[in-house]
Amino acid sequence: MSELVESETSPLGQPRSGGPVAMRLENVAVSFNGRTAVRDATFDVTKNRVTSLIGPSGSGKTTLLRALNRLHDLTPGAKVSGRILLEGTDIYRGNITVTELRSRVGMVFQRPNPFPTMTIYENAVSGLRFNGIKKKAILDEAAESSLRAAALWDSVSSRLKVTAGQLSGGEQQRLCIARALALDPEVLLMDEPTSALDPIATLHIENLMTTLKSRVTIIIVTHNMQQAARISDDCAFLLMGEDRAGELIEFDATEKIFNNPADSRTLDYTLGRFG
Amino acid sequence: MNVAGLAPTPDTGHELRAEIRRTSQNARARRVLVSRVMMTLCAVAITLAAVPLVMLIFELLQKGIPVLDTTFFLKEPQSPTLLSPNATGGVSNAIIGTLALSIYASIMAIPVGVLAGIYLAESDSKLASVLRIVSQTMAGAPSILMGLFAFSFIIQDLHIGFSALAGSFALAVLMLPVIAISTEISVRNVPQTLREAGLALGAKPHKISLKVVLPTALSGIVTGVILAISRAIGETAPVMLVIAGGYTDSWKPLDPVSALPLTIFMNAKSEWPSLRAQTWGIALVLVAFVFVLSLTARIWASRKQKVGN
Amino acid sequence: MVLLPDLLPQPEEVAEFSSATSSRSWYHYLLIAVSLLFTLVSVGFVLSILLKSLPTWAHTGTLLTSRVWQPPNGPYGGLAMIVGTLETSIIALAIAGVVGLGTSIAIVFLIPRRLRNIVATFIELLAAVPSIVYGLWGFLVLAPFMLNTVDPWLNSWPFAKEVLGTSGQEFGSSLLLAAIVLSVMILPTFVAISREVIAAVPQDLIEASLSLGATRWQMIKDVVLPTARIGLFGATFLSLARATGETVAVALVAGGVANMQFHLLYPGTSIASWIALEFGEAQGNEISALMALGILLMAISFSLSLVSRWLVNRQRKLLAKV
């Protein structure tokens, strides 16, 4: 494995924790039809930690996150430049297909989006089925394991055959997390996963993330600074530049970003002076 | 993962992950291939769909344009003879007949359709819900049935005879539900706040409906009316049973009249190649008419929408 | 477009504010009077045809059982027309459904976004082309092509003559040709609706499936089509309704022969086209029998329209929940 070597040459000075690198971003920029939406993103995502992307709206947090899963492939005119390395492999130009990438880098979206025509069980194993796993024993085992990991098993084990639409919003979001976890991804991308949820459901998800990080590296976009402070270990702060393109202002341990940031704009933002 | 009994031990969890990795790795190439094949088939499907439709347009232009001249538009039809096999005359009588039919049908259908549509949008009575089901069902009824209705009612019961009136009655019955439905939708799309503003100013409800709601919904209503007319113009089945057709050149409501689509139907099987060729011209005129009307309606609707927003 | 009234957004709750109907003004009474008139016309539409058809149901009663149509004294059997209608519209639907579904998928997921609106507009325009034009094209272009090229080729297959019948009919008119012309005709209708239904599947479900490693086809097969399925059934039934009710195109290309015919290369007829072809010559009894055929057609059309409306409403509710 090459990650140990790579972490020694972390692009932004010291590696945050000295731990192995799960994903490395080098000068990543995303543009739509020639208009840059985000640029200059360079940082390392350390394994088994929660990395948060924060910044005001328009700063390109979500755009950057979606680049890590190649979801911009769907958008005509979208272009991703720079390098994004997953375990040392360039995910855009390296020896990895987009379907393999997506099975190794999972995604949880802003709005809970379980497949409405599938049952809870079918939702939980949908990723496995997409990836060609058909054996019932494996599916059953993985469904239970991932639903447990998403802290959903106890409440749904008796009704696996009902459609996912009958769950509450918070349960739906946990089902989406379980669905992503079933594939056992190395990295889990979360795009404001609690913005559509009530405070109690939000708390559940936040607790869940803290438990999950031993199993999967998490990158979360949030516009809720308290949330970033509570749950993340590392933090990237983005801001919209003068040409309306988002830029990475600062990347550091969360504690440092919130208590003693290097850039005054970071301080202004975390103190709530704008945004 | 570590509840007693059923739960897998961490060790089997590891095996599970390994098996998942292996299986998905092995299945990947095949899945991508299947996807490519199926998407290619979809591309084949759109080509298959386009071929006859493009061919149709091509034939229409290629065979229709040469037929269109002043004789076609201005002269009455005549029967080709062995001595002058190309003397088909024109179709001015059918143009007049079609215009007459659609004007009479519009006069009958537009007021009733629009007012019924307003009623559907603004009332929640039993009558409205019945009428809504009725109009949606009528909108899907085969057009030949309108012809049967006109024959049974106008010709058999009222003894009016084969006439423009009977034909336009059939077309009006065809247009009614289309106009009513599109009017209902346009009126419903008028923002509620506009009405409330009027009410707050103390205006009488029917004044609001006439002075505020209708002008705002007008573009949508006009769009629906244009589309209904364009559909009526091309219809053959409802009029063929009741207007007599043939070489008549009248436009009067109580006379038998001719119509463009009906002329196509009658001449397509003619033994004279010149008459068969002429039908392409009529078809081109009909299609051009329908396209122009539909596009006008669309452009109107989108332009008004922009202004409205 | 107006040809798809069922798919247009229709607010569920009726506006609480009923400006025109709450007050007892002349306007209110005018609206009610006109609506009653409309209802009356619709009731008259059904009753008038039904009453004229009564003699046939009462006296000969053979409409649903006999295959012989013998004016002026009967019997009037509709079996040939019923079977012909079923054969042509089901084959047409099978062709248009498969090709149309692929077309809709290609429009939504394959062709560039900029072209998408142009193609959609073009297809909706084609749905508005008068059916007589499709009939003319079928009769003057497709029929000779079938007669000279396709039919002999089909007949060169083993057992084809026994199953399809032999070609060489006058003009090339046949049930198969009618089915093909119908499929070309209903394709724009089917695509116009199914494209809309497929495009309405929420983007976040599509992204969710792709983010789980699904290929494009898996995304379509396992997420998009199941989510859109009820609306797709609706599109199918509306297209079937259009095919069964089509009159002049079939009258031009099917051959207009009232034989119950299972050999698809032989000429046949359908309910609607038979009414159109026979009406000119019909007298007395036969008019009543044709009215009875009309009632049959009405029953088919109304039930198809009810089913499709029910399906489309269910699809709308399903998507509202997502």
Image (cartoon, coloured by chain):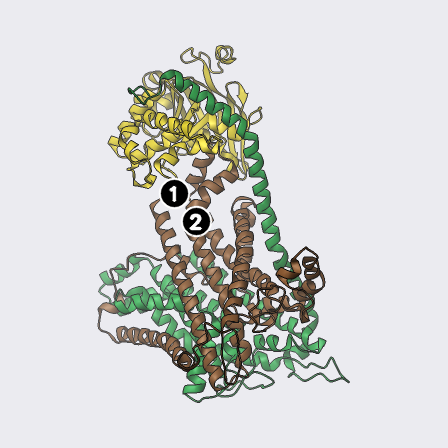
Chain colours: A yellow, B green, C brown
Count the numbered circles shown.
Answer: 2
Q: Who is closer to the viewer here, B288 or C128?
A: C128
Chain bearing mark 2:
C
Q: Position of residue A73 (x, y in %)?
A: 52, 35
Task: Identify which residue is drawn at 38% across, 51% down.
Answer: C315
**Which residue matches tag 2?**
C229
Tell me, for residue A117, which label it has, or none.
1
Image quadrant where one finds the C terminus of chain C? top left
Percent coordinates x, y for residue B97 in the rendering: 55, 81
- Please state the horizontal and vertical placement of residue A75, each as a whole percent of the image: 51, 38
Depicted B104 relative to depicted C322: above or below = below
Which residue appears at 69% of the width and 81% of the height?
B88
The chain letter under disc 1 is A
Residue B86 appears left or right of C234: right
Looking at this view, is C253 or B72 the one in front? C253
Q: Given contact means CB atoms under 8 Å apart, are the residues at marks 1 and 2 in contact?
A: yes
Q: Amino acid at mark 2?
A: Arg
Mark 1–mark 2 distance (CA, rounded to whole Å): 10 Å
